[in-house]
Image (tube, rainbow, N blue to C red):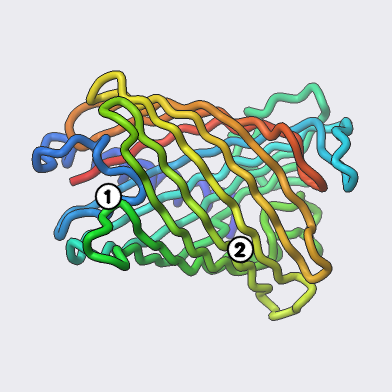
Amino acid sequence: MNKNMNKKIFLTLSLLLLLTLVVNGQEDVEEKSVQDYTPSVLMDKGQTEFKLYNSLFTQIEFFDTLGVRTNDVKRSSILTSIVEYNHGVSNRVTLGGEMWFKSTYIGSETSSAMNVLRFTNSSDSRTGIALIGMKVRYYPVKKWERFSIQTSILLSVISDPQSEKLDRPFIDNNRHLWRTKFLYDKKISNKFQAFTQLSAWVSIDKNLEDENTGIATPFDLFISYFPTKKITIYLHNQFFLSIGTNGISSYFLQEGLGIKYQLFRGVELETSYTSIIVGENIGAGQTFNLALRIIH
């Protein structure tokens, strides 16, 4: 898939999502605020959710195998844009799909992280659709409406994502991804809420080679504050542990701050920032995130 085709697909999907925003944004979403639909809460029967999530990760340092922060002598950046669609088939089951678009750029230490937005393919950059898949989220126990389970299968659709035979940088692992999440949130008071998420990411090598297969177990904790019904401010902590055939291959702890704002009924804009503060065999970088969510 050439770079012009990748650009056209990405721009077309973005345009379709924005058109959906214009059309659906004028409709009412029952009496609930978007704020009521936390990650653990399913869509009501017949409801749909669109989400465009953009995450720009950039690093000029990394944590070595001893956990020591070391200069990388270059800047590595990768943009991940995830397009999601979810539909409530019943009040206990939501079905959906995802597409992951990625763009990566490697330059000098003083280069700009925004170079990743050029969406080019060269010896220092690569762009393409990396993963496509389906997912299901459901309430395992009817009366526990704040506890849900989500499982998804994402297939790697880009050829040679590790660029082993190409004069281009690494863009993704040569693996399919099976993810299972356990999601739970708890109301602390009228203004505060806690959300936790424990996941299992099983990476399956496209060629079924054991040495390129592994599992990761990220754990997330969010503490949210609601100053108004339209604004959510949250703190985010994540511990991400990766296990390969020889045991623990890497880990990191990142912390961040985010804010969500309901533009109008059914439409929410979110932005956040995170930084990896501790790790081993992993990049010591930061992420800048921007998301748009529409519920109709």
**Looking at the image, which is closer to me, 225 or 31?**
225
Contact between labelled residues 1 and 2, with CB atoms less than 8 Å apart: no
Residue 124 position by quadrant? top right
Local SS, label 2: loop
**Looking at the image, which is closer to me, 266 or 75?**
266
Characterize the local packing of mark 1: few (<14), some (14-19) or many (20 or more) Cα atoms within 10 angstroms. Answer: some
The spot of residue 277 in percent (x, y) is 71, 32
Residue 209 position by quadrant? bottom right
Residue 156 position by quadrant? bottom right
Characterize the local packing of mark 2: few (<14), some (14-19) or many (20 or more) Cα atoms within 10 angstroms. Answer: some
Q: How many marks?
A: 2
29 relative to 34 in the view: left or right: left
Marks 2 and 1, the one that precedes in the sequence: 1
**Disc on res. 163:** none
The spot of residue 145 in percent (x, y) is 26, 55
- Comparing labels 2 and 1, the label whose residue is closer to the camera: 1
Local SS, label 1: strand
To which residue does mark 2 refer? 158
Does residue 274 sit above or below 216 in this rendering? above
- The residue drawn where x is 33% and y is 61% is 96
- The residue drawn where x is 79% and y is 71% is 245
To which residue does mark 1 refer? 49
Does residue 130 sit above or below 227 in this rendering? below
Amino acid type, mark 1: Glu
167 relative to 103 in the view: left or right: right
82 relative to 72 in the view: left or right: left
Estimate the spatial distance between the alpha carbons at disc 2 and disc 1, rounded to whole Å. Answer: 26 Å
